[in-house]
Image (tube, rainbow, N blue to C red):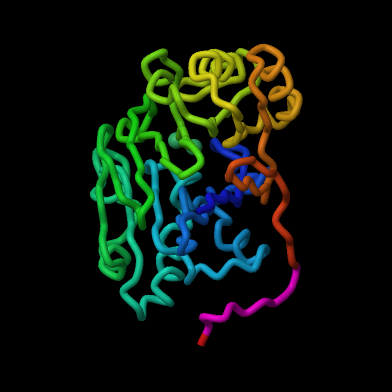
Amino acid sequence: MGFKITFLGTGGGRHSTMYQTRCTGGMLIEHGAEKHHLHIDPGPGALTQMHRIHYDPADTDSIIISHAHPDHYSDAEVAIEGMTHGGWIKHGHIYGSPTVITGEGELGPCISQYHQNIAETVTVFRPGDILDIDGLHTEICFANHSDPTNVGFKFNTSNGIVAYVSDTGYTDEIADQYIGVRVLILPVTAPNDSRILFHLCTEDAVKFINRVKPKLAIFTHLGIIMIKKDPAKQAEMTEKATGVRTIAATDLLVLDIGEDITISNAQKYDDEWIPPSAP
Ligand SMILES: [Zn+2]
Ligand SMILES: [Zn+2]
């Protein structure tokens, strides 16, 4: 059936986002027999990164936004224009937390009413919900973040569960939701024990992975101090401490999750590519 993830960006947090030390832009997932495309957390630079790998945003079927922080949503409206062929074709589905879709307190909404109206459906999710995203069975998990409506995701693929834990602080209860997953994608914003409130550091990642025991753990959403400390080294330390294969993602890394898991890099172009859906 296939489940392929392309990391458009692996930066996260304010500083690595504003300096673009690592790219941001979320993840693109290709899934199912019909090769549906799901874009998760289209942060700054998502469109640029899609251009670099010659991905036509009109191929996107659904967009998920976990919460109302700009490293997760800033390119969302343009990605929606891409998904709807410039707003001309009512196509695709938008999923977001309450702050993303309706706004709450000081946060959001992140998508204008116009952009919500050009999609086929708009869904607000909360922890405990189960979504059918173009045939992909998706469970919504709770998190502990400065946007209190943020969540994590468990995608049930034909080759095991793949989880994307969006921004959160560590608690045993949060980790326990992911027991049984095959691939655990963790936002490890900070290195060693330099804990930032409502985010994970490497020490938290070790605890998280020891509890969940996935087959493979992936670090992403790397903050500036994490990048200074060499994410690959932090992942290696984690692998030693947990016995679980752990990789720090790099920009445009591709994970193909079938019976085996293969890791490669997307082909990059530097040209004036015009996608097939263009006028
Ligand atoms: Zn973030
Ligand atoms: Zn956040």
Write the residue at 46% across / 36% down.
161
Write the residue at 70% across / 32% down.
227
- Horizontally, is 68 left or right of 262 in the view? left
State whether residue 21 appears in this view: no
Q: How many marks?
A: 0
- Horizontally, is 106 left or right of 183 in the view? left
> Which corner quadrant of the image does residue 153 belong to?
top left
Residue 5, position in %: x, y?
57, 49
Q: Which residues are magenta?
A: 270-278
Residue 109, position in %: x, y?
30, 50
Write the residue at 73% across / 22% down.
236
Does 230 sit above or below residue 14? above
Residue 251, position in %: x, y?
68, 47
- Horizontally, is 39 left or right of 264 in the view? left
Give 15 or 22, whichever is nearer the viewer. 22
Give 178 or 227, whichever is nearer the viewer. 178
State whether residue 191 appears in this view: yes
- The secondary structure making up most of the magenta span is loop
> Which corner quadrant of the image does residue 193 belong to?
top right
Is residue 112 within the magenta segment?
Answer: no
Residue 267, position in %: x, y?
73, 60
Q: Which residue appears farthest toward the front when viewing the image?
A: 259
Does 197 sit above or below residue 142? above
Give 168 or 112, whichever is nearer the viewer. 168
Does 39 sit above or below residue 82? above
Write the residue at 45% across / 35% down.
166
> Which corner quadrant of the image does residue 176 belong to?
top left
- Horizontally, is 73 left or right of 258 in the view? left
